[in-house]
Image: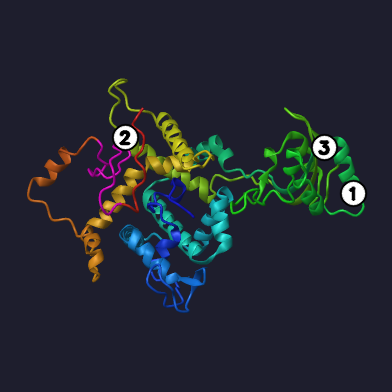
Amino acid sequence: MLKSNTRKYLWMTAGLSITASLALVGCNNGGSGGAAGGATSGGDTIAVVNGTNIGREDLRTYLEAKGGTQVLRQLIDFELVMQHAKTAGVEITDAELDAAIADQQKQNPQMAQTVKNGGAALETLRREMRYQLALDKLLTKDIKVDEAAQKKWFEKNRTRYDKPAQVQVGILFASTKQRADVMSQQLKKDKSFHDLVEEQKKANDDIAKASTANTSESPTPGMPAPEYLPISALPEALKQAAEKLKPGETSGVVELKGAQTAYAIMKLIKREDAVKAKADDPLPLLEYKLEQVARKAMTQLPVNPQTKKKPTFEEYSAQAQQYLQQQNMQQGRMEPPTQRDVLNLINQSEVQRILTEVRSKATVSSTDPVYTAVVKEYQPAPTPAAGAAGGAAAGAAPGAAPDGSTAGGVDGGGAPAAGNAAGAAPAAPAAP
């Protein structure tokens, strides 16, 4: 289940699976279904419980009842942002979308699994990523790039963009050299690498049980694993062996020294060579622009009453990264936040400014009484009386976004107002 996180650019789902979003916009349900909790007659059955069918329409009805208003806000905001992007001359091509998803799934095994599975979840992921790319372009469309400054910035940060050499490998582990030598001889005769892995997994030996036929296979059923493993992540002895092997070849016995000595035989399955990034590649160029947006947004931060100074970009970024790491750990994710995550968090006030603008001009209606309250949140803002606008701006709360709103601004941390669910992120940490 793909949930909201900063990688997916402030797309809040309130704990709903992304397939719920698609279910509410008429995904192919294939059949009639029945009342939630009851038997279905034919159609698209997704589960059978003691002979009773649960249909896709049952699931759709239940999800709509549980989170329909929240998801409808997301869909309305998506449509408003895409319309605004078109008016602003911002286009998201299918090639850009495919490239963005390919880049993200290399970092996020769960996203890679969604792409592999296809279906409604993939279609919703594509919608979500298109929304992100539109916001990226809207945020950065007025940024003028100083080529020399951008190249200098790139050289300082290029390790984020260079692609290291990566491999898929199988590894046979043994706690004794004797057992490792026996397996090495068996591989030269009549045993396959896969068969030996299965034998080691059944052994009464925790080291042997760590054997794997392919490091891209998850050790935990149902949980995705990275498609490739950076060579640099391997122990030094295995790293040296991997660099000498060709795909399909198997190493000799390698001794692994540590708290407990172990022995390994490695099979190279696939290799991807290292690739050096360039300053004008799409990703570093975009993140350079987003950093300029973030630096500008930080000029709206209040002065720290203790230091009598505004925080520097580096200070605020460090605190934002720490905050995001805590969020990741609370959600059971151990990977560190990326610089992109940090930029997304700092830029949330600018995202909110765009959303406030498109919502204030929107005409949204619904014939369904269940959702009339939602669409009322999108009525155009009334024209202020003479002199009212200046007074409102002057009286904006300390946590206001640059446009004077208080919905989730980077410097305020206010809770998003009604109707803001799709565009607002968790509040940023207080200024250091």
Q: Disc 1 on helix, strand or loop?
A: helix
Left or right: where does residue 156 sit relative to residue 234? left
Residue 369, x across and y down, in percent: 22, 68
Camera-nearest label, 2 or 3:
3
Residue 171 to residue 40: above or below: above
Between 118 and 212, the one nearer to me in the picture: 212
Residue marked by disc 3: 254
Query: Residue at the location (12% across, 55% down)?
Result: 383
Query: Label 2's element?
Result: helix
Query: Any mark on residue 186, and which?
Result: 1
Residue pictured at 58% horizontal, 38% vertical = 159
Within the magenta stretch, is there residue 400? Answer: yes
Q: Looking at the picture, how far across and down is residue 424, in whole percent?
A: 34, 48
Q: Where is residue 420 in the image (x, y as percent from the top left)?
A: 29, 52
Q: In this view, does 397 lie to the left or right of 341?
A: left
Label 2 is placed on what type of residue? Answer: Thr
The secondary structure making up most of the magenta span is loop
Task: Kindly identify which residue carries mark 2.
Answer: 299
Q: How far apart are marks 3 and 1 (CA)?
A: 16 Å
Type of residue at label 1? Gln
Q: Residues within 10 Å of mark 1 (few under 14, many from 20)?
A: some
Magenta segment range? 399-420
Quadrant housing the C terminus: top left
